[in-house]
Image: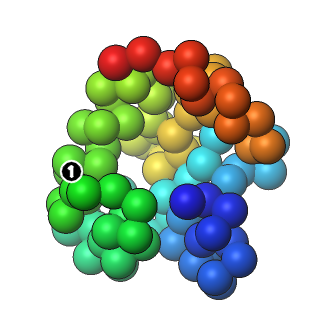
Amino acid sequence: MLDDAEKKGHSHIISWNTDGKSFVIKQCHNNDSGSVLLPILKMYFRQTKYRSFLRQLQGYSFFRETRGEYKGKCSHSLFVRGRRSLCLEMKR
């Protein structure tokens, strides 16, 4: 999803962080409805709500920054750019 978002010009909404070990939701945070992000999410997930997407991330033990300079950043030790095979090791 993140690579496609970049290719399709949506990196201003959601993108990989420069370190490749996290991604950033730039235009939707916890208090927003997620309306800008929803069309992108619908291409890849069954969720139709931003909060549902966040719950899915939490269910897979993603860490999400909710304050400060890094607000919107999501990370997981097994979610690394270019290393899709690591995702297979994630547990719910």
Q: Residue at x 61, y 59 (%)?
A: 2
On the image, numbered disc 1 is attached to which residue?
51
Foreground pick, 38 / 71: 38
Measured from the top left, where is residue 11 in percent x and y?
A: 63, 72
In the displayed structure, would residue 63 be above or below residue 53? above
Question: Where 75 sits versus 52, above or below?
Answer: above
Q: Nearer the viewer, residue 85 or 39?
A: 85
Q: Is residue 85 above or below residue 2?
A: above
Callout 1 crowding tier (Cα within 10 Å): few <14, some 14–19, many ≥20? some
Question: Percent from the top left, x then y, of residue 17?
Answer: 71, 50
Determine which quarter of the picture holds residue 55.
top left
Q: Can residue 58 be spotted in the picture? A: yes
Residue kind at label 1, given as amino acid type: Arg
Q: Is residue 53 left or right of residue 6?
A: left
Residue 41 appears at what percent x and percent y?
A: 37, 64
x 60%, y 48%: residue: 23
Give the farthest residue toward the bottom: 9
